[in-house]
Image: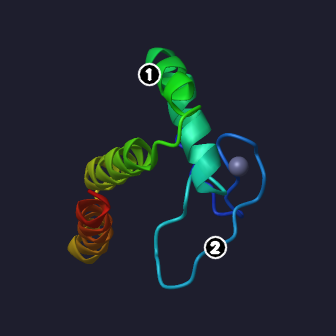
Amino acid sequence: MNQKTTEAPTCQYCSKEIQRTPGRGRPRKYCSDSCKQRAYELRHPASASREGARRVSDNTLRDKLFELRCAAEDIAIATNEGADANEIQSLCDELVTMAKKLERLQ
Ligand SMILES: [Zn+2]
């Protein structure tokens, strides 16, 4: 059965209702970045434990790289789901902005 939900989207991690963000057509899958991260860590337990151990020390760069990877994955998912060019473009813009911030950290 192919069910397409038209109701308010809920977070795939904590099931909380997700606030729709105006200006972006695509519903988010998680209510917050931390839920997104937790969900990702659930899917990749090995990287999570390594990540967790390192996070004891202040490791901003690693966190940012992680966000960058998530953003790249978002683009891949959006492409897979047949998102239109404008949407892909805006996701790419976010990725580039993020990467530029990363450059300044070093
Ligand atoms: Zn959540």
- Of the 4 image quadrants, the one containing the C terminus is bottom left
User: Disc 1 on helix, strand or loop?
Assistant: helix
Query: Residue at left 29%, top 50%?
Result: 72
Instruction: Tell me residue 39's x, y (percent).
Output: 58, 35
Instruction: Tell me residue 33's x, y (percent).
Output: 57, 54
Instruction: Tell me residue 25's x, y (percent).
Output: 46, 75
Display coloring: rainbow
- Asked if 53 appears above or below 37 in the picture, the reply is above
Residue holding disc 1: 47
Instruction: Tell me residue 34's x, y (percent).
Output: 62, 48
Residue furthest right as drawn? 16
Q: Residues within 10 Å of mark 1 (few under 14, many from 20)?
A: few
Asked whether, in this view, residue 67 is left or right of residue 3, the answer is: left
Residue furthest bottom as drawn? 23
Q: Between residues 99 and 74, which one lies in front from this camera angle?
A: 99
Please state which of the two labelled residues, at mark 1 or mark 2, is closer to the viewer: 1
- Asked if 95 appears above or below 76 in the picture, the reply is below
Q: Residues within 10 Å of mark 2 (few under 14, many from 20)?
A: some
Q: Between residues 58 and 48, which one lies in front from this camera angle?
A: 58
Q: Which mark is residue 20?
A: 2
Question: Disc 1 or 2, which lies upstream in sequence?
Answer: 2
User: Disc 2 on helix, strand or loop?
Assistant: loop
Amino acid at circle 2: Arg
- Of the 4 image quadrants, the one containing the N terminus is top right
Query: Residue at left 27%, top 66%?
Result: 104
Query: Residue at left 76%, top 45%?
Result: 15
Q: Which mark is residue 95?
A: none
Number of numbered tags placed on the structure image: 2
Amino acid at circle 1: Ser
Query: Residue at left 70%, top 62%?
Result: 18
